[in-house]
Image (tube, rainbow, N blue to C red):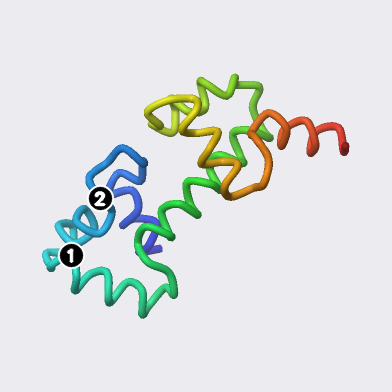
Amino acid sequence: MRGSNTFCAAGGGPRREPARRGFAKTYGTTAHAFSTAFSASIGLSPKEYIHRRLNQEAIQLVLNTDLKVKKIADKLRFSSEFHFSRFFKTFNGVSPSRYRQRFRTGV
């Protein structure tokens, strides 16, 4: 799938070069032209797309591993555990630890 290759090509982590510049460079276009085309095609801005993909990966790591939140933050290339937890809570309404507890125990 082209979108997932694009995500990988641009690095996909939050500490990378801003998304649309990375994507634009990969496809040899300007950041504005890429962002416009991407948004028209996908229905999300490159930043929104990256955040949703990153959140999906975070959920998988929270639910399917026993990694500590700090290790997940490191693996996903967040600058700190706090930054990751804040990002996660913004998307999911609860902290990563609470999310894990809820879905593993059904609470």
Residue 94 in picture, x, y percent from top left: 68, 40
- The amino acid beneath tag 1 is Ala
Residue 18 numbered mark, or none: 2
Residue 63 in picture, x, y percent from top left: 68, 35
Does the residue at mark 2 contact the one at mark 1 (Cβ under 8 Å)? yes
Residue 9 in picture, x, y percent from top left: 27, 50
Residue 31 numbered mark, or none: 1
Write down the quadrant of residue 20 in the picture. bottom left
Write down the quadrant of residue 79 in the picture. top left
State whether residue 92 is above or below residue 102.
below
Residue at (13% x, 67% y) in the render: 30
Say few, some or many: other residues with alpha carbon within 10 Å of mark 2 (under 14 / 14 to 19 / 20 or more): some
**Image quadrant occupied by the N terminus:** bottom left
Q: How many marks?
A: 2
Residue 71 in picture, x, y percent from top left: 51, 21
Mark 2 / mark 1, whichever is N-terminal: 2
Residue at (14% x, 57% y) in the render: 25
Cα gap from disc 2 to disc 1, whole angstroms: 10 Å
Left or right of 56 on screen, residue 34:
left
